[in-house]
Image (tube, rainbow, N blue to C red):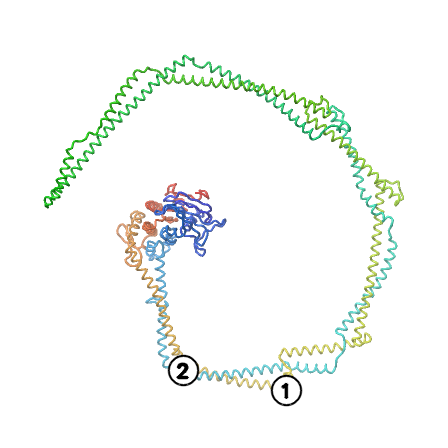
Amino acid sequence: MRIIDLHIYGYGKLENYQITSMDRFHVFYGENEAGKSTIMSFIHSILFGFPARQSTELRYEPKNHSKYGGKIKAFFPEKGIAVIERVKGKAAGDVTVSLEDGTVGGEELLKDLMQRMDKSIYQAIFSFNVHGLQNIQAIKGEELGKYLFSAGTLGTDKLFNAETALLKEMEIRFKPSGKKPLINEKLKEIKEVQSALKQAEYQNERYSELLSEKEAIERKIAQLETEIIECEQRNAKLKEYKRNEQMVIEEAALQRKLEEYGPVNFPEDGLLRYEKIDQQLKPIEARMLWIKEKMMTLINEAESSKPDSALLEQETEIESILERLPLLDQLKQEKRLLEWKIEELTEEISQINDNLYTDFNEETIQGINTSVFIKEEFENIQRSQQRLTDKRLELESGFEEEKNALVELEGTLSAVENELLPEAKRVQLTEELAVLENKQQIQLELSQVKDQILAHKNRVKNEEIIRTSQKKKDRYQLLLFGVIFLSILLWGAINSQWLLSAVGITGLLFLLIIHFKPEAHKVTASGDEILTELLNRERTLTEMLNKQPDGHHFSIKSQLLKDEELRHRHRELLVKIEQQQMRYEKVIEQFERWEMEEAGFKVKKTALIEQLGLSSASGHGKLFDAYQLVEKQKQNFRERKRTEEKLQSISGTLEEFEKALKMLGERFLQSANMSTIETAALMKKKLREAIDLKAKYHELTVKLDELEEEVAVLEKDQQVLTEEKLSLFAQAKADDEDEFRIQAKKHEQMKSWSVRLADVNHQLAVSGITSQDREQILTGNALEDQISENVQLTEQRKKELSSQFDSLANVKHSMNVLEEGGLYSELLHKYKQMKHDFVEDAKEWAKYAIARDLLSRTINRFKDERMPRMLAQAESFLSVLTDGSYVRIIPQLSGSGFLIERNDHILFEANELSQATAEQVYVAVRLALASVHYDRYPFPIIIDDSFVNFDHKRTERIIGLLREMPNNQILFFTCHRHLLDYFKNDEILNLEEKSPNIV
């Protein structure tokens, strides 16, 4: 398999990235983060699927876009070129494989192409990096040989790790001389339990008696503990009685007082409600007195603040006139502007009349037609005038150009006619050129005939050589067959095989006939005739050539060619002069048409000038400008008329305003001689004063209404509070305030006793004192005597309990003495359980022991069957890498590991080698493993900076070794620039210098 092209749709930071035309040896160079690891992972992912999400491998999913995956174009020896495309889909991605014969498939076809190899095996055999060398540095000396053996077997340290893991698991469970392993500890415990089980058999009967005695003591202890708890509970209850005794006595006394006093009728919170009503009535009465005084003051003030009703009735009209006062100045200003504008328009009208040499007025200007149609005609006539002017200039320029061109052509024709050869001279030169050309043709034919004669002679000579060689070959063949037939004759004669003898004699006779047969003449008569004919033709051509005259062929031909060019030039000039003459006449005709068109234009122009009412003297300028002036004059007359009408309207408005303002001044100011501004200012002041008085009068009226409403509300509140006060007296059955307060005092006393009684009852209830308990406290024996008797009974029961605990301790001590080795049944159960666990652990140890034995047998089989071929290749590689210093790699006789033989036949174990030599052994073994697998798995070898620890000599050797592996495609990834010196430029792909999209 050889990878040809890579196309990355989206993988890591690479997007739409292409690498084409990959060679057998391809180097990928780039600094860190340039994309080397991304491209390596891309190759693995396309061939074997994207890593699972829960895998430790990076998936390299793009962050900036959603397209994930790409395709690889590769050559497979048995299938040809295949395109493998894998994009985002299921966990490993959706793959499509297209072969060059048109076959399209998926994952199964890809597995067939990859010969069912999975990713881990491929990486172990064909893909290795610097981590393998780093592992060599980290592994202990005694284990280095096993690691190299594992690398040579599987390509990775999995075999080494598997063997180490199996041994570790076995030693965790059992060591023949160990103490801490699990099986060793359990074996020791089983022996101890077995010894204790024998002792328990003698003490089993005594143990049963002690067990019965122990149960009886425990029952007695439980009974005593119950009695002690009951005594302690009664003691606690008596103490609670003693603590609440005073409250029970107080509760009985309060109950008697309430019964003796009897019920008292008094409203709830009556005294508080009475005082609240009294407090509310006093401010109401004070407020009513103040309001009445305030109302008298406001009435007097309102009488003195009445406004002028007649003036207020004219308020709207006066405000309207005053609001228009600012407009007065504006109207006056506008009037002055209009008068100035009329003067300007009159001046402009006069100026336009002067420009047009006429005297338009309002009556005459209106009769002039300035419609859009007339405007369009003037625009057309203006364009026509400009076009005729441009045309005239163009014709004048063209006339001069055509005239000059005609004169120039006639001069050129005269010069060419002077250079032409005379006709007689031209005929003479033509005849001489024909004779000279015939001589050249004869020379050419003579040269060809001589070449044919020479070729014919060479062909005859070659045929003679071939004939001589064939003759010698035939002689050797006859001699060989003669020996064979003579041997057959002799064998038949010796063994009396006459048939064989006859065959031998016949063969010899046949060979003699062939040998003495006259040789046919190979050179035919036709060949001689051809040679004779060529020789005769050569003689004839030589004679003809000698008869030809001498002369300078090139000079004559040059003169004739130049004359022919001049004659061709002469003919061209005659045609051009004729064409130029036609163009000259055409320009003259265009001049005539222009003059006719100009005459018609002048007639139309005169008619249009008359339509504008202008004299012919004013019509020689730009017609459209004249039309625009007439149109402007017409607009000026209209504008002046509109302005005069607007001026008249503004003057009327000003007169009307001044008249209205004068009438107001005569009515309310009693003066008609003031100016407009003074009248407006005084009217505005008088109106403002009337409005202020109106507002003040209205405000006073509103305040009086509010005070009257407030008095009505206060009188109503006063009535309600008075009725509520009388209702309280009625409920307390009191006639006046003093009697009401006496009833209130009695009610408070009863209420305080009731509250205290409720509080006492609550505390007693919380303490758990029931009515029966209260009765017992009041009527029973003294509580001190009851507490003393109960304490004595409790102490007595505690002494009995202590005695029983001593007896129980003695029994338990005797039982513990018997139980030091455990009871017999328990020990027997424990012994069988431990024995079962021991057997299970032994089975678990046996699994690992069998696995290690199978692994050892597999290693021995590999060493006998498959390793010799790999080691032979590895020895060859190691010899190259070490420059012949180490020549052999010998497997250990038992287990895994290698011995390395130096060129002086001294053997070294792997841990005895230097670090660099051990790394060279590792590289040789890995390359040998990939090389021997190529016949079955022809896949590329991917190397990621595995030689960075080598010096320049070792690096040169390893690069040379890789080049000597012609079968595998080598993909070498590196970030070290100094390594590029070992490769050709066309083998290096610089990931930093190439385009981010196409490489």
User: Visible in this render: residue 924?
Assistant: no
Q: Residue at x 42, y 13 (%)?
A: 423
Looking at the image, the residue that sits furthest to the right is 670
Secondary element under disc 2, as helix, strand or loop, is: helix
Which picture quadrant has residue 181? bottom left
Amino acid marked by disc 2: Tyr
Which picture quadrant has residue 544? top left
Q: Residue at x 70, y 25 (%)?
A: 608
Which picture quadrant has residue 190? bottom left
Above or below, comparing residue 987 to residue 601 in the picture: below
Above or below, comparing residue 765 to residue 529 in the picture: below
What number is the disc on residue 207? 2
On the image, the x and y values in percent for residue 333 come to 79, 37
Looking at the image, the residue that sits furthest to the bottom is 781
On the image, the x and y values in percent for residue 368 come to 74, 28
Horizontal side of 295 relative to 494 (left or right) equals right
What number is the disc on residue 222? none
**Residue marked by disc 1:** 780
Secondary element under disc 1, as helix, strand or loop, is: loop
Horizontal side of 372 relative to 74 (left or right) equals right
Query: Pointer 1: residues within 10 angstroms few (<14), some, or many (20+)?
Result: few
Horizontal side of 535 relative to 598 (left or right) equals left
**768 or 82: nearer the viewer:** 82
